Amino acid sequence: MNSDMTIGKLAVLLAVSSNNEENKIFKKGEELGYKLFKGRAGSMDGEKIFAAVETAAKRRGIIQNQYREEHTLYHSILDAFHGVCRGELALGSILRSVGLIFSVVRGPRLAGDYSDGEWLAVALYGTIGAPIKGFEHEVMGLGINNI
Amino acid sequence: MNSDMTIGKLAVLLAVSSNNEENKIFKKGEELGYKLFKGRAGSMDGEKIFAAVETAAKRRGIIQNQYREEHTLYHSILDAFHGVCRGELALGSILRSVGLIFSVVRGPRLAGDYSDGEWLAVALYGTIGAPIKGFEHEVMGLGINNI
Amino acid sequence: MNSDMTIGKLAVLLAVSSNNEENKIFKKGEELGYKLFKGRAGSMDGEKIFAAVETAAKRRGIIQNQYREEHTLYHSILDAFHGVCRGELALGSILRSVGLIFSVVRGPRLAGDYSDGEWLAVALYGTIGAPIKGFEHEVMGLGINNI
Amino acid sequence: MNSDMTIGKLAVLLAVSSNNEENKIFKKGEELGYKLFKGRAGSMDGEKIFAAVETAAKRRGIIQNQYREEHTLYHSILDAFHGVCRGELALGSILRSVGLIFSVVRGPRLAGDYSDGEWLAVALYGTIGAPIKGFEHEVMGLGINNI
Amino acid sequence: MNSDMTIGKLAVLLAVSSNNEENKIFKKGEELGYKLFKGRAGSMDGEKIFAAVETAAKRRGIIQNQYREEHTLYHSILDAFHGVCRGELALGSILRSVGLIFSVVRGPRLAGDYSDGEWLAVALYGTIGAPIKGFEHEVMGLGINNI
Amino acid sequence: MNSDMTIGKLAVLLAVSSNNEENKIFKKGEELGYKLFKGRAGSMDGEKIFAAVETAAKRRGIIQNQYREEHTLYHSILDAFHGVCRGELALGSILRSVGLIFSVVRGPRLAGDYSDGEWLAVALYGTIGAPIKGFEHEVMGLGINNI
């Protein structure tokens, strides 16, 4: 990873990283001044994905418990969820479920450039499919908003 | 990159890779039996993104000039474009444009496992924004279909 | 309110009016030959909003218990609900709920002009947000169809 | 039915056929080398429509129990469901339910022309409406994908 | 065709009928009291499909030149167009075009039953695909509204 | 208007106000510390609506020429445009055009309560319809985001 790191690339790389790759990304991101978190959520119910990301982001102090920060986070999850669902924001009601890894990253759009304030990125990566083991393929979503 | 590589992760990593990272990903992917391509497309017209990916994929022999393969590619681009647009498949008509890097990857869902035939992944990564330099943020989309 | 009153403006004003403003709007509307109703509905379940408006409109005699009138009402609620949801017709399944005031107005598109028959307007106004008190902002929707 | 029969027309005709018309369509389709099935599903829950079609198609051997075939079937149901829902893939959550006849047809796009491999068509035909008897109108959807 | 004919089934059968089948359907429909029309429209521009259906329906006297009738027709075309597009109401802007046959039918929901007034059905049937000859598959849409 | 004024209600009332009502709303809003603007935009091209609102908001100093403020404004227009379009963000491409009055309001969610920072509301009100004079009905949209 070179110096032209960005908030979105960090979120994407963190979400797709395997266990032994993720430490390098956390370290790189933190050196560049970002706050980062990575978690896991799977469900046939969309709201459980939203709740898992929101709860984690608040507990880890990535956002403050304040509506305007929560609102930015919500819309970043929603934007990323569009990438996962690709057209219809529905899981169980159209007989599919997801197993996702999520990352939340807070900081400037471009590493080191604070002229445009802080932004919040959420990446979702994992699988979507029928409720049958192995009947699934990968999906990815990314949402970024100003905080 | 470890041995549990997948078609989607390859497509995502290739799309977000910088110039000096991409060779490693091409090499790794090819060793695992995948066909890969990376290109660039930017526009206020959605159809130019579709055309750029389709033209490149045919020229490079990633798909054959046959409707069923073209149809799979089309739906993979469309799925990835949903991640870019996040809700409304519109660019210029809602006053925004994109600058994207795309990757196309063909092979098994899981590296080395041909029991479920070949699949096609398209990843789109770049920026979306107002037609004003710097007024943009990152977006990402991924589409995967059986070929 | 001047004489160029319209069905949609009446519905919007009635929905956003405070308790002490609403009587003036009811009176004005009725003088102009409109049937008007105002009610309240809040939920994480979209169907409860639809049911509340439909039940009220039937009970108050704004529509007759006939499919073609019910169909027009349904599509007016659906159109207004698009304004509330702004892109994805989902509440609880994407972890949000609404508290809404609704108005239903029946009469001509333009006050006094019956040359184009009767129309039905539904306005929805209130708040959408996280299931946390105060974590919400205002939303508004309007749906109009020929009856 | 003349010799320029197609997979989609077969699926549509089978879905809208009355009991005494359907045998002629089955016979014609089978003579042309197609596999066909017709069933019935009604619900306020979208997933029950998906499950009914998937279960029937597997049991009758129209698709094999393999992810790539199940994935093609899923997307054909989803495409057809768009025609039924016309804009928002929601039933009970926006207070409506469906009573549908479905057909599944497997074979070439154009009867007798195997140059482009096999495709899968799903047609859905029936009524959508309020949960009140007779308060409903007809809907139709068709989805076709390469298998 | 038996006596339990409906407006939607008539529209669908008329749209998918070949030249030598269509006269029987016109005759049957007219005997049952319906007004019917069948035409053809193809384009990469959605508005040309709308304009072709609207112009034909007005010229043939299926609707009167009055806003409430035009509004019902518009929404029936829009509903049918959802079935054609299956998720995103876009043609050329996502690099696809359609070649469609359309039918417009006016009359009661169920043949002979005028207790619920007149309704309007629009069916669209044809192909969607890449702007390459033969790279296309069938699509179908149906829209019905009270007039 | 009483003291429990809110940013959304102000935006809605300003957008629907007639010429002789609007001064009272401007005055009331400004007394409560809000910045307000009202303008007019009509087109078959969605981007012209976006451009008209953005240009006006920048010229009148309601937002600064900074990406994070422009991004908030863009999403507020987009949210309001959903209310206008009700399902598909398309105008000319589905043969319809709009004539809109827009309002932009900046300030706290609830008048006088700055504990949650500043927000931006955009309201769009006017008519949508066929490109034929008088063949149109009213529409309304409201979008609110944190700035």
Image: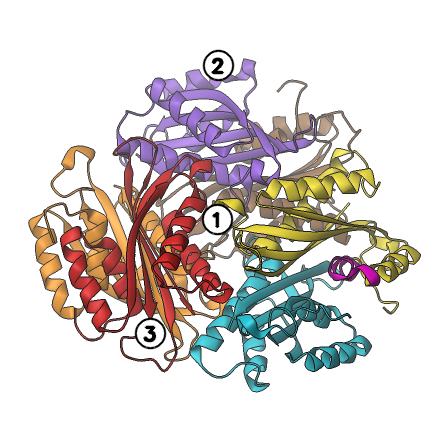
Chain colours: A cyan, B yellow, C orange, D brown, E purple, F red
Q: Residues within 10 Å of mark 3 (few under 14, many from 20)?
A: many
Looking at the picture, how far across and down is residue A58, in whole percent?
54, 83
Q: Nearer the viewer, mark 3 or mark 2?
A: 3
- Residue flagged by tag 2: what amino acid is it? Asn
Q: Are marks 3 and 2 in contact (CB under 8 Å)?
A: no
Looking at the picture, how far across and down is residue F43, in whole percent?
37, 40
Q: CA separation, marks 3 and 2?
A: 66 Å
Residue C43 visible in image: no
Residue C94 visible in image: yes
Q: Which residue is mark 3?
A: F108
Q: Does residue D58 sit above or below C97 in this rendering?
A: above
- Residue flagged by tag 1: what amino acid is it? Ile
Q: Which residue is mark 2?
A: E23
- Residue flagged by tag 3: what amino acid is it? Pro
Q: Does residue F15 sit above or below C4 in this rendering?
A: below
> Is residue B18 shown in magenta?
yes
Q: Quadrant of residue E64?
A: top left
Please state, as top left, top right, bottom left or bottom right, where the N terminus of chain F lies in the image: bottom left
Please name whichever residue, C42 or D39, is drawn nearer the observer in this view of the structure. C42
Q: Does residue A91 sit above or below D101 in this rendering?
A: below
Mark 2, secondary structure of its residue: helix
Q: CA separation, marks 1 and 3?
A: 27 Å
Characterize the magenta stretch by its predominant secondary structure.
helix
Q: Which residue is mark 1?
A: B94
1 and 2 marks on the same chain: no
- What segment carries the magenta color? B8-20
Relative side of C106 to A26, left or right: left
> Is residue E139 shown in magenta?
no
Q: What chain letter is assigned to the residue under label 2?
A: E
